Amino acid sequence: MNVRRIVDLSVPLDESTQIYPGDPEPRIRAAARLEHDGFNLLSVQIGSQTGTHIDAPYHFSAAGPRIDELDLGLFAGPATVLDVRDAGARGRIGWDLIAPYADRLQPGVIALFNTGRSAHYGTPAYFDNPYLDADACRRMLDLGVRTFLLDAPSIDETPDSSHPSEGFPAHHLIADAGGVIGENLCNVEAIDFEPFVCCLPLRLTGADGAPARVVAIDLVG
């Protein structure tokens, strides 16, 4: 196998990284500088869900595996890109939008959602994300999908004063099935090949999730 192309699906991680409402603000500062200390070193303070990241089941299930306890096979595999942009802002991603891809969804296949929301990253409109319907989520799990990645801040509706929380149903369903969720991806629209995706999170001991460098790889040969 040869690598023909790699598409980076990760947002930059710095102090301007947009965070989910209420999450810790990232603080990334110089701890040592080449001109003073002979080397460069950063001090990095971030939340476990900062930037492009992976949720472990423990994020929503006290009995669920933590990020460092999961099978690494969840974080790499062939992916199917699901174009669900028709759901629109705060729209429900129902089975009608998933069904055209159902024959490609099976155990070991990563579901990679193109919601179109990453075009609004860095603005308040980013949080008007579409969300995965509970029934559609169950059907995907029944097909064997255990890795759900999307270019949006959450797989569930992001609550605000006009949209109270519905209890994060997709998060709970996926956690209960031992699956993982990757959020805050970007550049999904640039994938014009059958991708092999790697979404390896940092090995944070006992954590609910961790930042990840997510890439789509065009393999040939």
Image (tube, rainbow, N blue to C red):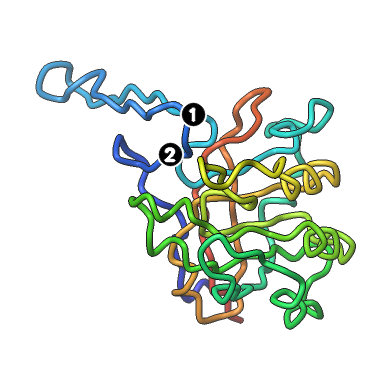
Residue placed under numbered mark 2 in the picture: 19
| Circle number at residue 109 | none
Drawn side of residue 173 relative to residue 27, left or right: right
Separation of residues labelled 2 and 1 (CA atoms): 9 Å
Out of 149 and 79, give the one closest to the viewer: 149
Q: Is residue 1 visible?
A: no
Number of on-image labels: 2
Q: Are marks 2 and 1 in contact (CB under 8 Å)?
A: yes
Q: Is residue 100 visible?
A: yes
- Quadrant position of the N terminus in the picture: bottom right
Q: Check the image and report above or below for 191 versus 132.
A: below
Disc 2, SS: loop
Amino acid type shown at disc 1: Gly
Q: Check the image and report above or below for 68 versus 164.
A: above
Residue at horizontal 79%, vertical 62%? 108
Q: Position of residue 54 (x, y in %)?
A: 61, 44
Amino acid type shown at disc 2: Ile
Out of 51 and 138, give the one closest to the viewer: 138
Residue with the most extreme left position: 35
Drawn side of residue 8 relative to residue 14, left or right: right
Residue with the most extreme right position: 142
Residue at horizontal 52%, vertical 46%? 162
Residue at horizontal 58%, vertical 41%? 201
Residue at horizontal 44%, vertical 26%? 24
Residue placed under numbered mark 1 in the picture: 47
Drawn side of residue 86 relative to residue 116, left or right: right
Disc 1, SS: loop
Q: Position of residue 211 (x, y in %)?
A: 52, 39
Q: Position of residue 194 (x, y in %)?
A: 61, 78
